[in-house]
Amino acid sequence: MLFETEKKANLFIKFNSEEIESESGYSPIRVYFCITCNGWHVTSKEERLNMVSKTEHLLNLFTNEGKSKLTEREREIAEGKRKEELEKTNVQRLEKIYTRIDYGIKSLEMMMERLTYYSETLVTVYNYIEFMEKFGINETILRNINSVLNRFNKEIKTIGHNVWTQIHKENDSET
């Protein structure tokens, strides 16, 4: 049986050892960590095995005392696997960065379209105001146009602030 924690394995022994012994003649007496499945097991054997994982074995071979024991082929295999893992990790990182950049560019393009629309509208409104001032249009119309201009101005500032905030959020998340 596999247990996620040592505590769960010990509790299993505590509450089930008598029943297991009555059924099989053996009773679990201790728990041990299994390096193969990365979990805890129970056993009726008293002796403890000092098993070394494959990773630990390779690391020992790479240490100064074990360097001479490591064959050239084993070194090539270990280095090749390490290079493959590094390349895979780097490709994944680059893909994430590319996705963030692509998203950022699309967001900026959308915001630029909105800003272009608003700036063109503002120019048109200012042209109308100049025209109206030349030909004596009443104050109420000018005030209404001014309020529209103020709303456009606020919207443009909000868009600019959002662009600025988004750029800084993306820069902060990368670090």
Image: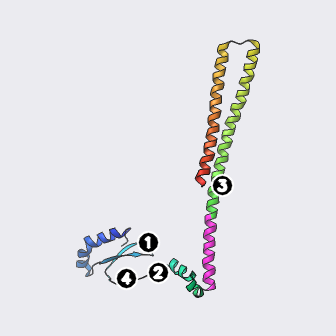
Residue carrying label 2: 52
In space, the residues marked 1 and 3 are separated at their CA atoms by: 35 Å
Residue carrying label 3: 98
Q: Residue at x 71, y 13 (%)?
A: 137
Residue carrying label 4: 48
Front residue of this view, candidates 167 and 123 = 167
**Would residue 85 be counted in the magenta stretch?**
yes
* Residue type, label 3: Tyr
Q: Please state the horizontal and vertical placement of residue 140, each as a whole percent of the image.
A: 64, 14
Q: Residues within 10 Å of mark 4 (few under 14, many from 20)?
A: few
Front residue of this view, candidates 35 and 169 = 169
Q: Nearer the viewer, mark 1 or mark 4?
A: 4
Q: Is residue 107 above or below residue 54?
A: above
State the mark number for residue 164: none
The magenta stretch spans which residues? 71-89
* Residue type, label 2: Val
Is 50 positioned to the left or the right of 66 in the image?
A: left
Proximity of marks 2 and 3: CB atoms separated by less than 8 Å: no
Q: Residue at x 62, y 38 (%)?
A: 161
